[in-house]
Image (cartoon, helix red, strand yellow):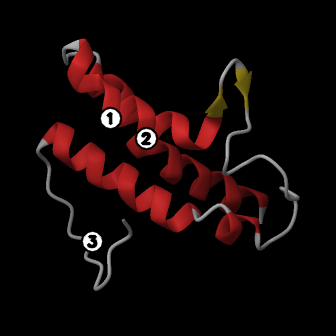
Amino acid sequence: MRLQMMREGFQDFEPRLTILEAIKKLPAEERKPYQTLLNDISHSGDRHFGDRRLLGGNPHLSQEELRIDWPAYLARTYRAAEELTGIKTEGKWEEPPK
């Protein structure tokens, strides 16, 4: 179980890593939307771990991913990585997250 959770964690981190690498080549103004996306889940001011999504709740509950809307956030990171790299993904959503 732990190995599976690590594997899924690495998969979830991959688009974030792709975005971090790709925005290094962009002018500062073009980086802002991607930085906002990356910071949406992990930063709040100077504090690491805890913005509007992660503040509060119990990170050990199985429903926590749904409370922070992790699937929609992850879909947006994959879409941003796709935009930055030009590599099209095959994933399709009937009703994509906003």
Which quadrant would the C terminus be assigned to in this image? bottom left
Q: Which mark is residue 78?
A: none
Q: Position of residue 81 (x, y in %)?
A: 28, 44
Which quadrant would the N terminus be assigned to in this image? bottom right
Q: Secondary structure at mark 3?
A: loop
Q: Position of residue 50 (x, y in %)?
A: 74, 38
Q: Look at label 2 and name its amino acid.
A: Leu
Q: Which residue is drawn at the image coordinates 11% and 44% (left, top)?
A: 86
Q: Which residue is drawn at the image coordinates 70% and 17% (left, top)?
A: 46
Q: Which residue is drawn at the image coordinates 61% and 51% (left, top)?
A: 9
Q: Quadrant of the rendered structure where residue 76 is?
A: bottom left
Which residue position holds label 2? 37
In the rendered structure, the answer to whether residue 17 lies left or right of residue 33 reads right
Q: Look at label 3 and name its amino acid.
A: Gly
Name the N-terminal-most of marks 1 and 3: 1
In the rendered structure, the answer to whether residue 15 lies left or right of residue 3 reads left
Q: Quadrant of the rendered structure where residue 2 is?
A: bottom right
Name the N-terminal-most of marks 3 and 2: 2
Residue 88's place in the image compared with 13, above or below, is below
Q: Which mark is residue 33?
A: 1
Q: Nearer the viewer, residue 3 or 88?
A: 88
Q: Are marks 2 and 1 in contact (CB under 8 Å)?
A: yes
Q: Nearer the viewer, residue 2 or 49?
A: 49
Q: Secondary structure at mark 1?
A: helix
Crowd tier of the residue under label 2, counting other residues whose Cα lies within 10 Å: few below 14, some 14–19, many 20 or above: some
Q: Look at label 1 and name its amino acid.
A: Pro
In the rendered structure, the answer to whether residue 36 lies left or right of residue 70 reads left
Which residue position holds label 3? 91
